[in-house]
Image (cartoon, helix red, strand yellow):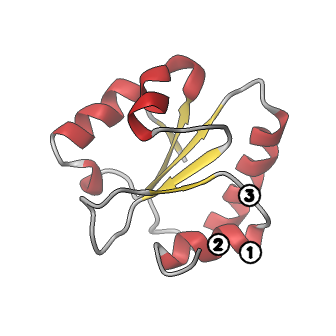
Amino acid sequence: MNDIAGDQLLQWISNETRDQEIDALYVYSPLCGTCKLAERMLQIALEPLSAYRIGKLNLNDSPEVAHAFKIHSIPCLIIWNPKQPREEPKLIYAMHSVTHLYEQLKGGFAND
């Protein structure tokens, strides 16, 4: 996972180049214990998905992203539909398990 600045993400969205940069975005706060656990689970889920491009964003540094994506809580995983990159993304707040995260990432919008 690569760190992404909020202004960089919003620029990709406005320029419609986000789909060329990342497939999903993990939104967290460094002071959030649940976020640390979710990030570790996400790292494990991503191991077999080596081609998947995921960024991570510290929400404390980019509150405008919370407003732009209507993020209600953290941790939050934003997944864009690879078949419809301009479609509204799916926001996942509950990181149930590594298997659940893997299925969400692998399936795009196929699984809820």
What's the CA distance linking mark 3 and mark 2? 10 Å
Vertical position of residue 75 compared to residue 93: above or below = above
Q: Residue furthest top?
A: 61
Q: Quadrant of residue 49?
A: bottom right
Identify the residue under disc 1: 99
Of 5 and 110, the residue lying toward us: 110
What's under tag 2, amino acid-wise?
Tyr
Binning the other alpha carbons within 10 Å of mark 2 as few (below 14), some (14 to 19) or many (20 upward) gives: many
**Residue positioned 58% across, 71% down in the render:** 104
Q: Considering only order in the chain, which callout, 2 or 3, is on the residue closer to the N terminus?
A: 3
Identify the residue under disc 2: 102
Camera sees residue 36: yes
Residue 98 drawn at (x, y percent): 76, 67
**Residue positioned 66% across, 51% down in the render:** 93
What's the CA distance linking mark 1 and mark 2? 5 Å
**Residue positioned 28% across, 56% down in the render:** 19
Identify the residue under disc 3: 95
Q: Secondary structure at mark 3?
A: loop
Q: Is residue 30 left or right of residue 111?
A: right
What's under tag 1, amino acid-wise?
Thr
